[in-house]
Every structure is written in C-alpha cells, then in structure tokens.
Image: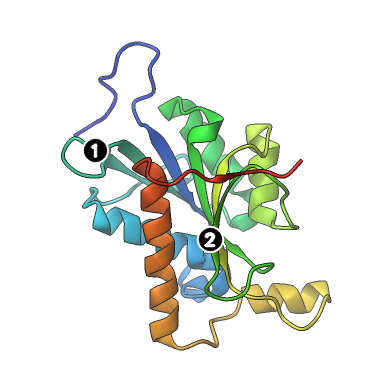
Amino acid sequence: MRLGRSAAGASPVDWLVVGLGNPGSQYAATRHNIGFEVANALAARWQLPRAKRRYSALVTDGRTGPGGPRVAIVLPQTYMNESGRAVSPARGSYRVPLERILVLHDEIDLPFGEIRARMGGGLAGHNGLKSLKRELGSPDFARVRIGVDRPPTTDPDRVAAYVLGRFSESPADVRELIERATDTAERIVLGELEPEARRT
C-alpha cells in the first residue's frame, strides 16, 4: 500500500528512519553498519514490504502495525560519507520535518552496548552525520547512538579500520545490542520515548 494519500501538504509518513552504513557484502556485520542492522530489524518487526531502490537508497514504507504510525525506512547506498545525497531527496519526497528524521548510527564515543537517544547535537567526527548535516542543512534530527566502543588509539587510519572491522564481541552480545537499539528506535517512533535535547 502506498502512503501518498494524505491530505494535501501533509507528510505521507510520520517518521523517516535512516539506517547508516556502507553498501556491499564486505561491509556487512561491521561496526560502522550497525545502523543498517537496526533498520532492517525494524522493517522485519513491522513487517514492511521488501525495500526498493529509490533516491540512491533502499526504501520501504508502511505502518508499524494496525493504526500505528506511518514510517519510511531508508538505507543509503551511497557509502557512508555521502549518505545525505540519498536522505535529502527521500526527505523531500516524503515531506518529513527535520525533527521527524530518526538516524540510527554507530557511536565510538559510547562503550559497547550503551544506547542513547538524542535530538540534534554534535557530529563527533562521524562522516555519515556530517553528510546528513551538509545535505539537510542542519544537524537537528533525532538519533539513536549505538555504542560500539573506541579503539585504544587516536590515529585516524586505525580508527577507520576499527569501525570498518567486524565486532570482537560475541555474536550473542551483538544480537542483543541490535535488539535493544531496535527497541529504543521503536519507542521513539511510537511516542513512548523522547530523545534528550542537545546540549547547548
């Protein structure tokens, strides 16, 4: 079912959910792709249709359940540092206010397993968030920050290799992290959780 039958001027969806990651099998199950994993878990939980390629992204939309909020889930296929090039046209098509964009992303400044929801705030050197700010014109979108821990180095190349590497934690711990991040994102969409305001 298409969702474009709303009243003129109204958004056809209540939330645009963006999972950040890199396309391609070589990046699957890496720390940097945890946003993809959580977005796919949400789509499965909500039984959304198979994603189709649009806006340089994989996109699906529907309701979270009978009578539930209308959502579109976007997985940019542009590589992380160009994610905004996919999200901006998707936002334009779905006519979603900035504060109704929910971005799911890895966060090296949080310990593995820690999850925080935030509205706006800094970008912490995250190339996906930088691209979104550049293309959307503002960083004031909601985020689910998924802790993947930081390597014991500040060397940019080693940090990049770390986030593009696979988890050293057990598969069970990674599955639990994905499940809890999925729960957090769902609670935001259902109006059960308010992301914390950015610090001034």
Q: Which mark is drawn over residue 183?
A: none
The mark lying in front, picked from 1 and 2, is 1
Residue at position x 55%, y 35% in the image:
88
Q: Which amino acid does label 2 sit on?
A: Gly
User: Is residue 168 or residue 119 the one in the foreground?
Assistant: 119
Splitting the image into 4 quarters, where does residue 141 fall? top right
Q: Which mark is drawn over residue 68?
A: 1
State the image coordinates of residue 157 (x, y, percent, origin top left).
Answer: 78, 75
Query: Looking at the image, can residue 178 be seen?
Result: yes
Vertical comparison of 52 with 42: above or below: above
State the image coordinates of residue 104 (x, y, percent, origin top left).
Answer: 51, 54
The residues bearing labels 1 and 2 have C-alpha atoms spaced at a distance of: 27 Å
Q: Which colour style is shown? A: rainbow
Looking at the image, is mark 1 or mark 2 earlier in the sequence? 2
Residue at position x 68%, y 34% in the image:
138
Q: Which mark is drawn over residue 21?
A: 2
Splitting the image into 4 quarters, where does residue 80 fall? bottom right
Q: What residue type is labelled 1?
A: Gly
State the image coordinates of residue 193 (x, y, percent, origin top left).
Answer: 43, 47
Vertical comparison of 69 with 180: above or below: above
Residue at position x 34%, y 42% in the image:
190
Vertical comparison of 128 with 137: above or below: below
Is residue 196 found left or right of 123 in the rendered image?
left
Looking at the rendered structure, the secondary structure element under dot 2 is: loop
Q: Which residue lies furthest to the top in this view?
A: 8
Is residue 122 found left or right of 37 in the rendered image?
right
Is residue 122 found left or right of 182 in the rendered image?
right
State the image coordinates of residue 19 (x, y, percent, origin top left).
Answer: 48, 54
Residue at position x 30%, y 41% in the image:
61
Query: Looking at the image, can residue 73 be seen?
Result: no
Looking at the rendered structure, the secondary structure element under dot 1 is: loop
